[in-house]
Amino acid sequence: MEITFDPAKDAENRRKHGISLVRARELDVLTAMYDEDRSQDYGEVRWNVVAWLRTSLYTLTFTDESTGAIRAISLRKATKEEQRRYAEQI
């Protein structure tokens, strides 16, 4: 799967969350939990995926591109609530 992102957004994500959007490629999408992000009207459909990245759960927010790629918007460690919901899923 191809993952794209805005370099300025990547710099902001590294500053804010301490991780580059490049690392989204390492997420274990086979065991991931997907939810549509309906927290705001973004003018586009956004998804949140909670998945393992090595030994920690992370949350990636992304949107689908018309090219078939996904555009990463945010990558951060999963919250306690996201971790709980993930554990209930499996």
Image (cartoon, rainbow, N blue to C red):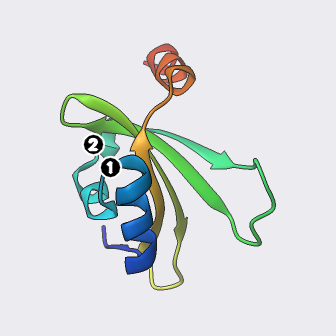
Is residue 39 visible to the viewer in this orientation of the structure?
yes
3D distance between C-alphas at marks 2 and 1: 19 Å
Any mark on residue 84, and which?
A: none
Residue at the spot 65% in from the left edge and 49% down from the top edge: 36
Q: Which residue is under mark 2?
A: 28
Residue at position x 68%, y 64% from top? Answer: 45
In the image, what residue type sits under mark 2?
Asp
Q: Residue furthest left?
A: 54
Q: Position of residue 41 (x, y in %)?
A: 81, 61
At label 1, counting other C-alpha atoms closer than 10 Å, the crowd grade (few under 14, some 14-19, many 20 or more) is: few
> Which residue is more in the foreground, 85 or 9?
9
Based on the displayed image, in which of its 4 quarters is residue 10 positioned?
bottom left
The tag earlier along the polypeptide, 2 or 1, is: 1
State whether residue 8 is above or below residue 26. below
* Residue 6 visible, this orientation: no
Give the left or right position of residue 32, taking residue 53 as reference: right
Give residue 84's position: percent from left, percent from top: 51, 16
Q: Where is residue 3 in the image (x, y as percent from the top left)?
A: 34, 70
Q: What element carries label 2?
A: loop
**Which residue appears farthest toward the front when viewing the image?**
15
Looking at the rendered structure, the kind of residue marked 1 is Gly
Instruction: Pick the quarter of the image with the C terminus.
Output: top left
Residue lying at 18% horizontally and 36% vertically, measured from the top left: 54
Residue at point 53%, 70% (across, down): 64
Residue placed most toward the observer, 2 or 9: 9
Does 66 appear above or below 70?
A: below
Q: Name the residue under label 1.
A: 18
